[in-house]
Image: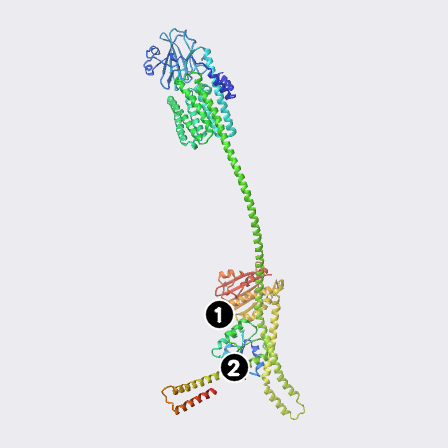
Amino acid sequence: MRALEFRRLIAAGTGRSLLVLLGLIAWSASFTAQDYIGKRLETLAPQEASALIQVTDLGSSDQWVSSGKVVPYLGLSNDIQWLRLKVDPRTENGQLIEIQNAGIDELICYMICDGDIIATYERGIFHETPVDSRIGTYPSFPIPLVECGELQALFRLQSSKPLLIPMRITGPREVLRGAHERDVLFASYFGVILVMLLYNLFLFLSVGDRSYLEYSIYILMIGGTQLVLNGYAPVFGVENFPWLNLRLTHFFGVFSGLTTIVFAQNFLRLSHYVPWLHKLLNVYFVLYVVAFILAMFGLLVWSYSVINFCAGAIFFLIPGAIVTMRKGYAPARYFLIAFSVFIAAVIVFVLKDTGLIPYNQWTFFALPLGSAFEVILLSLALASRINQLKREGAKAREEQLELAQVNEKIVRDQNVVLEERVKKRTFELEEINSTMQGTLNELQSAQQQLIQSEKLASIGQLTAGIAHELNNPINFVSSSAQSLRRDFEDLNAIVEAVKSLPADDPNLQARIEDIHTLLGQLDIDFTQQEIEELLNGIEDGANRTSEIVRGLRIFSRMDGDNFIQADINELMNSTLVVLRSNLRSQSQVSANLAEDLPEFSCQPGRLNQVFMNIITNAAQATETTDLTLEEREVVVSTLMVESIGQSWIEVRIKDNGVGMDDAVKAQIFDPFFTTKPVGEGTGLGLSIVMGILRDHNAEVDVQSEVGLGTEFIIRFPI
Amino acid sequence: MINVLYLDDESHNLTAFRAAFRRDFQVHVTTEPTEAVRILREQPIEVIISDQKMPSLSGVEFFELIMPDNPDPIRMLLTGHADIDAVIDAINKGQIYKYISKPWNEAELKSLVEEAAALYHQRKVMAREGQQLITKMDEARVLARRIHQLTSGGNPATQENHMEITDLANQIDRLLQS
């Protein structure tokens, strides 16, 4: 029922927390000072009390001294504290003694009348009291007065928390009213806390910023601490767990301290702005852990002392916040205000405990009120921080955007420049290209010219050879013809002499003798032999001339690029004929041509060029050796071979010349490569040969050994 | 008759040459350079004709070979094809009198041989006369030295001396007139 009430109160307090808080401030200001009876209370020094065993002896002890304070403060101690109140119930305004301190772990009240204990009341965490036996609402301890003229009320007090005794004698209505007021106040407070908690949790869930979660935990701890401190521990349902119940205040103290440190460190970004404070707070962090351990092991007073000591850490947060603020971190301002308010509240709270300022509902509520303000202000601070972050983010984004725009502009400009460049380059490239095309054309035409000149050189070489070959027979044929005429004239003279012989000439004998004389004079025998020789020469000359002309006819197809059916041997013979005069002085050239070779499709003129080139090279290669003319050999052979499932006409041109090493061999088909002195060869011969053979799909193999000779093996597919 | 030596690797040319010129010249023909050298040694050859293009050696090479021992015969080169390198070589190395291309013109060749032979004989005569001139000059120099002795200081200008000087001067005069 109480919990239900409480929840209702919380529910009532959850709306418009700030307005409610403001209302509360106005309301609490209207509280009248309560009639605390501290000055009537007497205290007994614990060492005096421990000497006495009987409660009644204690009551009659003469060591009691007046507390002298409206709200006595018995300090924080493990000792059992004793209080005595002398009262005449008949003269009092009310019938209930109320101690408005929920932090008392154990309270036993002995009512002594005329030296006898006539009633005992036990309160506190260790003395579970049925809820309905209580008078009023938690957290006060109302104790009913007993009928007696000279009533002595002895209070045995023990707590692990500071013992402050705001005691009054009053009626049930007032107790109820006071409790009710507190409930309202704390419900409102808790409402604020709850709102802020939910608000920040919600923010955490939606924004995802970790600091909201930290803050939520912080709020939870702060609120919890306040509730526990003011006797609302049952809210957490710990009544049936005395061990935890006893330590709940400590635990909440520890955790609220820890969360404060963590929150402050992260919120103020102390590691960044005030590293020394960050480290110092870490020390406090450790101390809090120590306090927690102490509490766990039951050293509750020690634990509380440590917690109290650690609470001083919040004073460091003020300079920390100021430094941070000075360094331009705006949210620190809110933090500073929030903590200033809270610290002010703490100061009020402490001053109230020490009696320097009056103990009333207002001062009593100062701490929760300050805490509520702090929570709200910190919430604002957090919002500001988020705003700051957002602003920074936005600014960063803006800067990025600006940067991006600048970049984009640069890129655009660059693009324009690049396009220009590309255009220029493209233009240049096109120009280069056209120049290169021109150069290529020139090169191609130069190549054509070179090929042509190589061809012309071949033809020139040929012409020289053929001219010599032809001029020799022509020379002796024509010369012989003239000589023959003269010989015939001689013979004619004889014939005429014989013809002119009359058949009946009596001087026949003498005429015959004359003819014989003439025969002798003209040396007719020699002339006859000479005629024979001259005729042989003419015949031979005519044959050779016709042979050369026939060779030339085949060679005259040199420029024809048409593929026609031709006989390889015929081609080879014609080549040898036209080369004969050149080769004769270089080498012994022999041909070993296979019979019955089929005709095959080729360019005879170009093949003549191929054979002429290779045979000439072969002859020249033999020329540079130490061999005599008779020993130098060039053997040309043709044959038919079967290879790779195909028939080939194979031409072998073998010499016993100087040969080539591999380096030379690798280059012989390269254009312009020559082993001849500058000016003696174009270096194109074999490269043209290669081109021609490629056109014939011929395969070429070159075998060579330095000092032994070279063999060209060419295969034409048929 | 003019002694002509003709060297050619082509025997038909030799036959044709002999048939053409045997009536005019004493013709010696051979296909072998070694044989040609032998003929040069044994016969009074006045004109040498050689083919340029031969398998074993060229005409120019042949001329170079025989020149040290046979400087006098007039050399003529015969070739089937006008090859400028051969011409340059022929003139520089072989000291050729004439360059003849095949086919030859019989009449032209005949007159060239005759010219060459004439040149040969002219050179012979000039050489002989030169030699005679040198001999006479030497004799004249001996006489002149004697005159110099007689006319230099120390010798009395006797009638006898005068007579001798006159005689010596007449002798020199006769020498130079011959």
Name the spot of residue A116 as percent of width and height, x first.
36, 8
Q: Which mark is residue A627?
A: 1
Q: Is residue A132 visible?
A: no
Q: Secondary structure at mark 1?
A: loop
Look at the picture and state if A691 lies above or below A76. below
Disc 2 chain ID: B
Residue at mark 1 shares a chain with residue at mark 2: no
Residue B120 - label: 2
Residue at the front extreme of this rendering: B157
Residue A243 placed where, x, y %? 41, 20
- Give the number of callouts: 2
In the image, taking residue A381 as reference, residue A642 lies left or right, namely right
Q: Nearer the viewer, residue A433 or A398?
A: A398
Q: Amino acid at mark 1?
A: Leu
Query: Where B77 sits versus A83, above or below?
Result: below
What whole-number distance in Å separates the C-alpha atoms at marks 1 and 2?
40 Å
Say whether residue A415 is visible: yes
Circle 1 residues within 10 Å: few <14, some 14–19, many ≥20? some
Q: Position of residue A652 (x, y in %)?
A: 55, 64
- Disc 2 is placed on an element classified as helix
